[in-house]
Structures are given as C-alpha cells and as structure tokens.
C-alpha cells in the first residue's frame, strides 16, 4: 500500500470518541477551522464588491454629472473616516485583550474589554451613518443617481452590515456572560467571534485605501 | 427506513432531556418528527436524495415539455400552427429546467452522497456540526420551494385568481405580475433580468438562488471541517477514499465560488428594487459585468457538478474490476488541479463578447489545459479496468457508460476552447449537446451508478439488477445519446438554443423529432428506475435484502453492518492503508482494521436533535416567497390587495430565521451517551445490550 508522507499524523487522537469531544485529527478545534474557512469565503464576497467598485472607478473617472461635482475628494470627509478607521482598529486591540482574558478565565476583564469593542463598533457605525446621511441629504449622492453612489453605498453598506452583525454577536455574548453559564470552557467561542471581528477590521483596512485614500493621490498639496 | 428498528430500540432508552432554554429536546420521537428534527448525517443524506430525485423528475417533466414544443417546426403558411406551450411559458420552462437540474437535482444529489457516504468513509460518527448540517438541508429545501412556488402563482394567474391590472397603467408593473415563474434563463443576463424586461419571476429566482447559496456554503464549510478534522486514527489524507477527496475539492469550490454569484444577485436585486445602476445601461452600468461575475461562479459550478461524479466512479470501477484504483495519488492530484484551473477559465463562456486578443488567447489556452487532468483521470480509469476481473453489475454498466459519454462531452468541450470555433458554436444546440453530454452522460450517469452502488447500504435492499441491466441502463444511456447526439448536427446547422420554435423550411424537423423520441425513452428509463427505488423502500418483499458488503467492496463504509447503527462505528476503526476494508479482508494479518481504544466508560457521544434548523428553513421560505411577491407592489389575489400582507410576511420570515438561529445558540449542544456492551468483534454489537444516559 502507498505510504505517503502526511503532515497531520493521526495516531493517538480519537476524533469524536466519547472520551474527548475536543480531540480532532489536526488538533485545531472544529469551530475555529469552520470560521477560518468561512472567512476565506467572505474574502470572495468582499473581493467581488471591491472589484465592482474599482472597475467602475476605472471606467468612469468622475463621480457623475450631478451637482456634487465630478471629484470624489470633495465628497469624502477624510478626517471623519480616518477617525472611524482608527476606532475600528483599536476595537480589534480590545477584542484581542478580551480573548486573552477569557483564555485566562478572567470574566470581569472579558466583559470590560468586550464592552469596549461594542462601544467602538457602535462609534464606527455611528460615523458611517453620519457619513451616509451627509452624502445623501447634503451632498446629494444616492444609490440611483450615479454608478459611484451604487457601488459606494453597497460596498460600504455591506461592510457596515458585517460590523453590525459583529456588534450584535458580541452584545449577545456580553449578556450571556451574566448567566453564569459562560466559563473558561467557552474561550474558543470568544476566539471565534474575535476572528470574525478582526477579519471585518482587516477588510476595512482594504476598503479605506482602495475606496477613499486612492482618490486623493496627487490631490493633496 | 432500514435503520428504523435499530434506532427505535436505542431511542426508546434516551432519557427526556431539557435544553438550556427549557424545551424538551426532540430525541425520543419516531416517524415524521424524527425526520424533521434529525441531525443524523445518514438521514439528512436520505432526505437530500429524496428531495433531489423529486426535483429531478420535475425538471425532467419540464424538459419533456420543451421537447414536445419542438416536435414540429413553425409553418407560417399553415393555419393551425403547432403550439404546445406559448413562448412565455417556453422561456419559463427552459429557465426552470436549467435551474432545477443544476441547483435542485444534481447538486443536492451530490450532497446526499457527501452526507451519507463521506463521514462513513473517513470513519467518523457524524459530521463536525450536526445541527448546521440540518440547517443546510432545510435552507436548501426552502430555496427549492421558493423557486418552484412561483409556478403555483403563475397557475393562479392563469386561473384568474390573481389580478395583474394596475391603476396607473405602468407597463413594467403590468409585466411584473404577468411573468411570475422565472423566465430569464438560468444565467439571468441583464438586461433580460432587469425590471423592465422581466416580471417577479426574476425575484423568485434571485431569492431562491440566494437561499441555495447559503445552504451550499454552510454544508461545504461543514464538510471541509469534517474531512480535515474528524478522520479516524490512521486515516491519513493520502489514505482517504477518492470520493472523500472529491467531496473536499468540491466543498472548497463551493465556498470560494458561490460568493461571486451571491454578490452578483445582491447587485441585481438592488438594481431591481432600489434603482442602483450596477447593470443598468442608462446609469452607465455594464451588463457584461454580470456575465463576468456569473461565470466566475458558473464555471467552478460546472466542476461542482462533475467532481462528485468523478469521485463515485473512482469508487465503483475498482470494486467491480477487483483491482486497486490505478494511480490513486495522480487521480487525487488531477481532481485538485481541475478545481484550481476551474477558477481560471470562466471567460470561455464569453468568447463572443470581444474580450480582446490577449484575454481570449489566455482563456483559450487555460481551457485546453484543463483537459489534461481530466484526460489523466480517464486513462487512470482505463488502467483500472485493464486486466481486471470485471463484473457487469448495473452500477458498473452506468460507470462504464459514464467514462465513454463523459469523454464525448469532454471532446466537444475541447472544440469550444478554440475561440474561433466557439464563435460558430456559441448559443447554438452544439453547446446544448456538449453540456448535456457532460451533465447527463457525466454527472447523472455517475450519480445513478452511485445510487445502484450505495442503495444496499442505505436501505438494506438490493435494487433489481435484472431490471437495471436490461431496461434502465439501455433506456437511460441509449435515450440520452439519441436525444443529445443529433443536437451536434442541429447546432452546427445553425439551430439556436432558447428559441421557442423554428421554421419548417429550415429542414431540421427530422432531427428535432429524433431528439424528442430520445428524450421520452430517457424519461421512461428514469421512470422505471425511480419506481424500482420507491417500491424497494416501501413495499415489503419487492427487493432482496442486502448483505452488509454485497459488492465485495474496498473502502471502510462497507465494514459497517446494514442497517447502519445511528453511531456508525461502535468502535472507531484504525485504518492501515488505502482500500482499508479490502486489505483488512484479504491482506496480511497486521493490516486488519482494529478497534481504536476508547478512554474510560463514557459510551458513545450522540448529538441531540433540534427543531431550530427547521424553523430557520421555514422562516427563509416565508421570507423568500413574500419578498418576491412584494417586489411588484401590486399583489392582488381573489380581489384583495395583499401588498401589506406580503411585506409583513417577508419581515416575519426573516425574524423567524433569526429567532431560529438564536434559540439554536441558546439551547446548547446537548447530546447523550450510548453504552454499547461489546458482545463480539468489531462492528458486531447487540443493540439489546445498549443503554443511554444523558450527557453531563
């Protein structure tokens, strides 16, 4: 029989046996692997959206013929978006502290840090809501009036939805931590939520340059 | 159900257990409730298969209606022109035929095999996430129903129960409520799928496909984790049966390709509902973007359909040739290479859209390259048969039919890869001939071979071999060839696909009639096949009882007793090589499958059943149907304006789905332990000695 080298040797581990439910062939927990595979899938979601935006940016250098002008740099408020980007980045830092606290079984520290993540996430969402409000009501950019509006709102809106789902998830976890059923055994659940949160953060670190900063190349003096 | 007696005995001993949210877990039910709440991968597999066969028959009926319409050409001079269905219905028929066969028949039938066979092949007791698996099943069912419920509303319109009239006389609103079943073809190109040119059928199509995407991605994530993480001791990656390998490759393809169509569908939905300009020319949108996004998904989808078939064939040929698979690592490697290359050839569906010379040449070249790993597989299968002791069971006949027919489809595929030739063949019946050779001659023949092969394991009954050899196989394989071979001629003579009729003077009526006869022969074959299956399961004494290893097979799923106990393996098997069951039966004494030692006396951990995945599926169905109906803002039935009702309905549906997920999270995984006292060797446990306790 063929004897092929295999990095994931299995001997000694009993996945799914009654003795130890957490034993897996690779030693990586099932939930964690599922989240990694899902994030690979989510990369393709955002990849498709970002490509759509960039393709139309290349075809139509202006933002359209509407009153808001043909230059996206006049649309964006770089100070606001930089601030919300920084807040989201820092929320990832708090998330990492929360995960670490849970691994140590420090429930109080976990609650404190996750509450911070929730607040920072809400600040980000608030900034985005303000930005959408300003673009739509004051600067006159809508889903319908040009293609930039379509791609911009759908792309950043999808990201905002991801942040909102993350906030909802963390709020559920934070509330659940008061039931007494949430122990150090659930550290992996927190870690999985953390993976998702970091991913959403990283996606924003792609969107921010690709959608906002790139428009300012050669225009800031 | 074959596992019923065994399961019932054990299930009767499960103590009533409350979940963390205070409801009783549905572990002790029998019959319908058991099936609705099941988390057992075998039962979920059977349900996937049953739904898939139902939709396979439905899609087949749609195909027969298409062929009946094309039976006679159109003679403008003759007063009584042949018209079996109207042009509008014809559009809906070919749209739903394509969508049904791909998403509701072949994919779920593959999923049935993934579910039933793969955990057994890797020596696991279930998939990694049993409730997520149930969620995938019910979400798939929801998506399938959303797509097909559109037919019922279309009939309601024809019956006069619905009122398409609008007060302000807006043209597209009127069309919206006239065109209720999807009619924009399975590729849904804008502008045909835009609000201006299609009715709410496209909304049903969008919602249905979104749900099917959710189901497929969730199932695939589950399979990926299961295969990588749940293997029994000694089951190294390069000892996995080829079918499991192909499950893994297919799952990765699904996970990475479905997002493209999900986003494309979201963009199309926004175009239709909120007036965005993604594909709308009047706002500067480019419809060709849809084609790119669709085929970035659509081409990997082709391999999602065929790779499970390639896996099944790689199980069946060695068994009935009594030889190991020729070049196991090469077959595995070729499957993975097909998966990789599948992402790099999408534009060969778009050669006629003027991509530019460089792009066309590159995609042409890559498309030709994909023939190499596929050809390698064909030669490996021939090498497997070479000098084998071949038994021509029905499964083997279908498997050999697969190799030949799939190769025919592959050869015409290589013809398409040459861009100049593709310009001649594009959008003609030549393309129809090509992809039916790879889908029926390929995927479907392989899946039928798989059903003949695995039916004894699933239901404990042998399908009728005589009927299979003498009636089913000739009718299906012969009928398919009679239907689709003439389409090569029709296509090269210029007959276009998706056309409602053709002129009599084109002189293509004869070949069309031969195609139609072939289609009906194929349908009779399927009819006998399905009837035999149903009677074997339902009617006592119709079919012989199957032994646990009827084919003298090679992989470890055949080492389980039939019917398979709920826990699959009483003790996890320690695997000693490729074809582990074969070497255990006929190899050296040290190659026998051993029982892995269990730590302590915990018993076997079983997952608890749950209602919540079903609730999610129901919520999704309500949401999809109501959202599609609300999209025209003009839903009037029996004289009542139901706009508000369906709007609320779609919100309630989404709410129910979210509620299902929350309750699912809150109820806790639960589970119970089965204690099976060993009475004899591996795999022979007496259920009478078993007992169940609640998990701590």
Image (cartoon, rainbow, N blue to C red):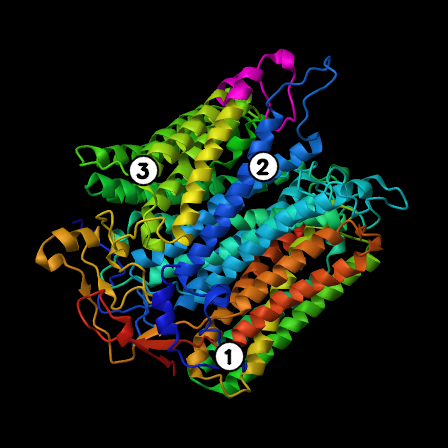
Q: Which residue has dot 2 on it?
A: B62
Observer able to see residue A37: yes
Cα–Cα gap, marks 3 and 2: 29 Å
Residue at figure coordinates x 76%, y 43% from the top left: B159
Which residue sits furthest left? B589
Q: Which residues are magenta?
A: B487-514
Q: Which of the two discs, 3 and 1, labels the residue nearer the N terminus? A: 1
Mark 1 surroundings: few (<14), some (14-19) or many (≥20) residues within 10 A:
some
The secondary element bearing badge 1 is classed as: loop
Q: Position of residue A191 (x, y in %)?
A: 46, 73
Determine which quarter of the picture holds residue B414. top left
Q: Which residue has dot 1 on it?
A: B24
Number of the front mark, 3 or 1: 3
**Numbered badge on residue B466:** 3
Chain containing mark 1: B
Q: Which of the two discs, 2 and 1, labels the residue nearer the N terminus? A: 1
Cα–Cα gap, marks 2 and 1: 44 Å
Q: Position of residue B592 (x, y in %)?
A: 14, 59
In the depicted structure, whether residue B162 falls above or below residue A99: above
Q: Quadrant of the N terminus of chain B?
A: bottom left
Q: Position of residue B150 (x, y in %)?
A: 67, 47
In the depicted structure, whether residue A154 falls above or below residue B412: below
Report if residue B664 lies within the magenta region: no
Determine which quarter of the picture holds residue B15. bottom left
For residue B20, side relative to residue B532 (left or right): right
Q: Nearer the viewer, residue A24 or A65?
A: A24
Q: Which of the two discs, 3 and 2, labels the residue nearer the N terminus? A: 2
Q: Nearer the viewer, residue B5 or B230?
A: B5
Q: Position of residue B197 (x, y in %)?
A: 74, 37
Chain containing mark 3: B
């Amino acid at each position: 029989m063929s004897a092929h080298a295999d990095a994931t040797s299995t001997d000694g581990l009993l996945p799914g046996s009654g003795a130890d439910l957490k034993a897996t062939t690779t030693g990586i927990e099932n939930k964690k692997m599922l989240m990694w595979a899902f994030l690979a899938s989510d990369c393709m979601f955002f990849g498709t959206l970002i490509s759509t935006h960039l393709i139309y940016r290349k075809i139509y250098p202006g933002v359209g013929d509407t009153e808001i002008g043909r230059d996206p740099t006049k649309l964006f408020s770089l100070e606001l978006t930089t601030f919300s980007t920084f807040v989201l980045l820092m929320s990832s830092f708090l998330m990492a502290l929360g995960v670490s606290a849970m691994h140590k079984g420090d429930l109080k520290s976990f609650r404190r840090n996750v509450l911070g993540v929730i607040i920072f996430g809400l600040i980000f969402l608030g900034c985005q809501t303000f930005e959408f409000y300003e673009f739509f009501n004051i600067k006159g950019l809508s889903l319908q009036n040009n293609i930039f509006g379509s791609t911009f709102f759908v792309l950043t809106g999808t990201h905002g939805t991801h942040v909102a789902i993350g906030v909802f998830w963390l709020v559920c976890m934070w509330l659940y931590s008061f039931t007494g059923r949430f122990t150090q055994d659930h550290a992996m659940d927190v870690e999985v939520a953390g993976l998702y949160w970091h991913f959403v953060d990283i996606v924003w670190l792609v969107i921010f340059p690709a959608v906002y900063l790139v428009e300012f190349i050669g225009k800031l003096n | 159900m074959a596992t019923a007696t065994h399961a019932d005995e054990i299930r009767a001993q499960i103590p009533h257990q409350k979940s963390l949210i205070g409801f009783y877990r549905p572990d002790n039910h029998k019959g319908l409730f058991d099936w609705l709440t099941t988390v057992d991968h075998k039962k979920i597999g059977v349900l996937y298969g049953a739904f898939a066969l139902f939709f396979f028959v439905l899609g087949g009926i749609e195909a027969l209606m298409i062929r009946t319409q094309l039976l006679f050409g159109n003679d403008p001079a003759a007063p009584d022109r042949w018209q079996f269905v109207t042009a509008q219905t014809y559009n809906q028929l070919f749209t739903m035929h394509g969508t049904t066969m791909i998403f509701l028949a072949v994919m779920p039938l593959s999923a049935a095999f993934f579910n039933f066979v793969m955990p057994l092949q890797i020596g696991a007791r279930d998939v990694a996430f049993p409730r997520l698996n149930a969620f995938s099943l019910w979400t798939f069912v929801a998506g399938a129903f959303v797509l097909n419920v559109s037919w019922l509303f279309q009939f309601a319109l024809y019956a006069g129960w619905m009122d398409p009239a609008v007060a302000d006389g807006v043209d597209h609103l009127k069309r919206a409520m006239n065109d209720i079943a999807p009619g924009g073809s399975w590729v849904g190109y804008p502008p045909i799928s835009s609000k201006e040119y299609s009715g709410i059928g496209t909304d049903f199509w969008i919602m249905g496909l979104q749900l099917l995407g959710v189901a497929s991605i969730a199932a695939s994530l589950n399979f990926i984790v299961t295969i990588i993480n749940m293997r029994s001791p000694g089951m190294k990656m390069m000892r996995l049966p080829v079918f499991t390998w192909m499950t893994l490759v297919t799952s990765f393809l699904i996970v990475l390709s479905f997002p493209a169509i999900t986003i494309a569908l979201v963009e199309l939905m926004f175009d239709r509902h909120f007036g965005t300009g993604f594909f709308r020319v009047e706002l500067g949108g480019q419809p060709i973007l849809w084609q790119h996004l669709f085929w970035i998904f659509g081409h990997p989808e082709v391999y999602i359909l065929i790779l499970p078939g390639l896996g099944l064939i790689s199980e069946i040929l060695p068994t009935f040739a009594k030889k190991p698979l020729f070049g196991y690592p090469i077959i595995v490697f070729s499957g993975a290479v097909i998966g990789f290359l599948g992402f790099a050839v999408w534009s060969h569906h778009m050669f006629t859209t003027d991509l530019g010379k460089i792009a066309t040449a590159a995609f042409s070249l890559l498309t030709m390259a994909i023939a190499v790993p596929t050809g390698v597989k064909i030669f490996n299968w021939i090498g497997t048969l070479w000098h084998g002791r071949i038994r021509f069971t029905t499964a083997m006949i279908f498997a050999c039919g697969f190799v030949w027919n799939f190769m025919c489809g592959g050869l015409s595929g290589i013809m398409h890869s040459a861009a100049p030739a593709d310009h001649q063949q594009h959008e003609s019946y030549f393309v129809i001939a090509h992809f039916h050779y790879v889908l029926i001659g390929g995927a479907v023949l392989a899946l039928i071979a798989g059903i003949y092969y695995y039916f004894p394991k699933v239901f404990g009954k042998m399908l009728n071999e005589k009927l299979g050899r003498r009636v089913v196989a000739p009718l299906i394989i012969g009928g398919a060839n009679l239907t689709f071979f003439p389409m090569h001629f029709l296509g090269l003579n210029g007959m276009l696909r998706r056309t409602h009729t053709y002129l009599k003077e084109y002189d293509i009526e004869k070949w069309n009639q031969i195609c139609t006869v072939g289609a009906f022969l194929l349908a009779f074959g399927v009819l006998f096949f399905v009837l035999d299956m149903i009677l074997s399961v339902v009617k006592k004494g119709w079919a012989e009882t199957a032994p646990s290893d009827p084919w003298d097979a090679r992989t470890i799923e055949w080492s389980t007793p039939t019917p398979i106990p709920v826990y699959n393996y009483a003790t996890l098997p320690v695997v000693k090589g490729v074809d582990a069951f074969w070497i255990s039966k006929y190899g050296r004494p040290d190659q026998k499958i051993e029982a892995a030692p269990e730590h302590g006396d915990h018993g076997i951990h079983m997952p608890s059943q749950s209602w919540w995945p079903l609730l999610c599926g129901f919520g999704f169905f309500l949401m999809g149907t109501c959202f599609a109906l609300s999209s025209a803002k003009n839903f009037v039935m029996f004289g009542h304006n139901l706009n508000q009702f369906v709007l609320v309905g779609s919100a309630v549906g989404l709410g129910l789905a979210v509620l299902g997920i929350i309750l699912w999270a809150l109820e806790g995984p639960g589970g119970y332990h089965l204690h099976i006292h060993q009475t004899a060797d591996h795999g022979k446990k007496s259920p009478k000695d078993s007992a169940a306790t609640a998990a701590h």
